[in-house]
Image: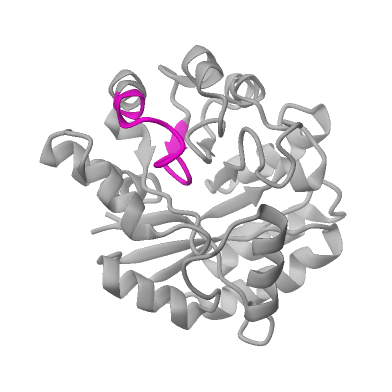
Amino acid sequence: MIVDIHTHAYPDDISVKAIENMERIFGLDSFCGGSIKELLSAMDKTGVDISVLQGVALNPHQVISINTWMGSVQSKRIKCFAAMHPDLGGFADEIERIKEFGFWGVKFQPEFQDFTPDEERMFPFYEKINELDLGVLFHTGFELSNPGVVHASPESILNVHKLFPEMKMIAGHFGGFMQWEEVEKYIVGTDVLLDTACVFGNLEDERIYKIIRSHGADKILLGSDHPLFSSREAVEGIKKLGFTKDEESLMLGKNALRLFGKE
């Protein structure tokens, strides 16, 4: 089983516009379109069994509609982390709702949402997420659209982990995109999970191997950041590092399935 924990897709009527906006914001060319149909096609070509959509709300008013759409596209192969925003009133009710939908977790994007993960105002969110045994995924490190600012640093992720050690916490983009020294200082050796979204091609393979070997293959999750990046590149990136087949199997899917009780 191969599970891509970090993907994005959009409703058919806005998928083309959404991709155009993403390409403009990030200065990248996506490798395919942004619809569910195109995601499933890419999964078939790569051999990915399950893709997990990560919802991103730029403002609190988008949260409910995004999550409603995501709930409508869930299937055996498409699972979801709900969009969430730190300024959402009634967030506890929305987290209860997405739990009923069968979502696996909640996604925060601190760079777009202008907050740091270890702010005290975020603690009630984490308490509710933890109470319902959901996961939480943070964008971490630099953001390509604003490379001079970091809201979700590896140190801030560690601070949250210390306060909520039982929470299923995933630090997207390998713990802190383009902050690799800080990742090694603050994250490696903890129980924080790392996904591989955007790491291949932005960090040399030798250092990726070193970080995984030090942190533990049992705490690494395959992530691609589809459709800006290819799941094939993420899968092949893991396979070429030189880990054992058992370790590869953990990173490619078993860790994710075990984390969310889907084994």
Q: Could you tell me which quadrant the N terminus lies in?
A: bottom left
- Location of residue 44 (image quadrant): bottom left
Q: 10 or 16, which is in the foreground?
A: 16
Residue 241 vertical placement versus 231 (above, below):
above
Residue 46 vertical placement versus 255 (above, below):
below
Left or right: 224, with 59 as reference point: left
- Location of residue 138 (image quadrant): top right
How does the figure colour the protein chain or chains? one colour
Left or right: 134, with 116 as reference point: left
- Location of residue 82 (image quadrant): bottom right
Residue 129 vertical placement versus 52 (above, below):
above
Does residue 22 appear anywhere in the picture? yes
Q: 47 or 229, which is in the foreground?
A: 229
Report the number of discs. 0
Which residue corresponds to the image point at 67% horizontal and 62% vertical from the top-left?
22
Q: 7 or 148, which is in the foreground?
A: 148
Q: Position of residue 71 (x, y in %)?
A: 58, 74
Q: Is residue 202 magenta?
A: yes
Q: Position of residue 170 (x, y in %)?
A: 51, 39
Q: Residue furthest bottom?
A: 13
Give the residues in magenta. 193-209
Does residue 76 appear anywhere in the picture? no
Q: Position of residue 133 (x, y in %)?
A: 52, 46
Which residue corresponds to the image point at 37% horizontal and 59% vertical from the top-left?
231
Left or right: 33, with 88 as reference point: left
Q: Is residue 184 magenta?
A: no
Which residue corresponds to the image point at 21% horizontal and 44% vertical from the top-left?
239
Residue 23 vertical placement versus 132 (above, below):
below
Q: Position of residue 58 (x, y in %)?
A: 79, 57
Q: 89 or 213, which is in the foreground?
A: 213
Which residue corresponds to the image point at 84% horizontal and 58% vertical from the top-left?
60
